C-alpha cells in the first residue's frame, strides 16, 4: 500500500470540476489509487489553501467552501492529516478557519497557540499577547 497525497490543485479540481479535463484526470487518478488500495491523504495545509482558492478564485462563500471541504475529508475516500483539523472545519464563528487549523496543529502536538487576535485567543489552549 502506498500513500498518495493530494496537492491543493488536485483538491480544488475535484471539488469544482474545473477545468473539466484536469478534473477528470484527477478523478481518474484518485479512482486508480483507491482501486490499488492506496491511502489517499489530504493535509491541513492543502485544506487551508483549497479553502482560500474556493473562496477567492471561484467565488464560493466561506461557509459553503468549509462545508465542501468538510464533506470531502469525511467522505471516507481520503484521510485528513492531522485528524485534529476536522474540528477546525466543523466549527463556525469566532476564529477563522485557517486560524483554527493552525491552532489544531499546535494542540495536536500538545502545545498552546500565542496570538494577538482576540477571536483566536478564545480557543481553548490559546493565549492572547498584549497588543501593546
Image (spheres, helix red, strand yellow):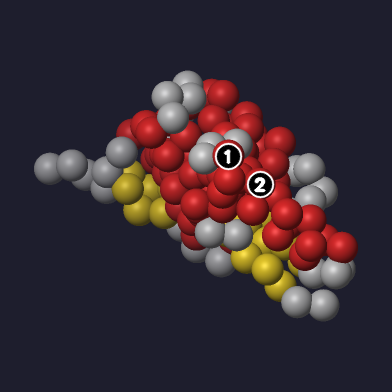
Q: Give the quadrant of the C terminus.
A: top left
State the residue position of label 2: 24
Q: Is 29 left or right of 58, judged from the image as shown? A: right
Which residue is depicted at the point 48% across and 25% down?
A: 60
Which of the two residues, 121 or 3, is positioned nearer the viewer here? 3
Mark 2, secondary structure of its residue? helix
Residue 32: which quarter of the image? bottom right
State the residue position of label 1: 20
Instruction: Please provide percent x and percent y for residue 14.
Output: 63, 43
Q: Alpha-carbon distance for marks 1 and 2?
A: 6 Å
Instruction: Please provide percent x and percent y for residue 63.
Output: 54, 24
Q: Is residue 66 above or below residue 41?
A: above
Q: Is residue 64 in view from this perspective? A: yes
The reply to whether dot 1 and dot 2 touch (C-beta < 8 Å) is yes
Instruction: Please provide percent x and percent y for residue 71.
Output: 71, 36
Mark 1, secondary structure of its residue? helix
Q: Is 92 left or right of 1, judged from the image as shown? A: left
Question: How dense is the environment of label 1, judged by Cα within 10 Å: few (below 14), some, or many (20 and up)?
Answer: few
Q: Is residue 87 above or below residue 43?
A: above
Instruction: Please provide percent x and percent y for residue 84.
Output: 64, 53
Which residue is depicted at the point 75% across and 77% down?
A: 2
Which of the two residues, 10 or 120, is positioned nearer the viewer here? 10
The tally of labels here is 2
Q: Is residue 101 above or below residue 1?
A: above
Q: Is residue 100 in view from this perspective? A: no
Which of the two residues, 109 or 86, is positioned nearer the viewer here? 86
Amino acid at each position: 500500500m502506498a500513500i498518495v497525497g493530494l496537492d491543493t490543485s488536485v483538491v480544488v479540481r475535484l471539488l469544482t470540476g474545473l477545468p473539466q479535463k484536469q478534473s477528470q484526470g484527477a478523478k481518474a487518478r484518485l479512482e486508480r489509487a483507491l482501486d490499488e488500495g492506496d491511502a489517499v491523504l489530504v493535509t491541513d495545509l492543502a485544506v487551508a489553501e483549497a479553502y482560500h482558492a474556493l473562496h477567492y478564485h471561484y467565488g464560493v462563500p466561506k461557509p459553503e467552501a468549509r462545508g465542501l471541504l468538510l464533506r470531502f475529508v469525511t467522505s471516507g475516500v481520503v484521510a485528513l492529516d492531522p485528524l485534529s483539523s476536522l474540528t477546525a472545519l466543523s466549527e463556525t464563528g469566532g476564529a477563522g478557519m485557517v486560524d483554527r487549523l493552525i491552532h489544531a496543529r499546535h494542540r495536536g502536538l500538545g502545545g498552546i497557540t500565542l496570538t494577538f487576535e482576540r477571536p483566536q485567543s478564545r480557543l481553548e489552549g490559546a493565549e492572547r499577547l498584549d497588543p501593546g
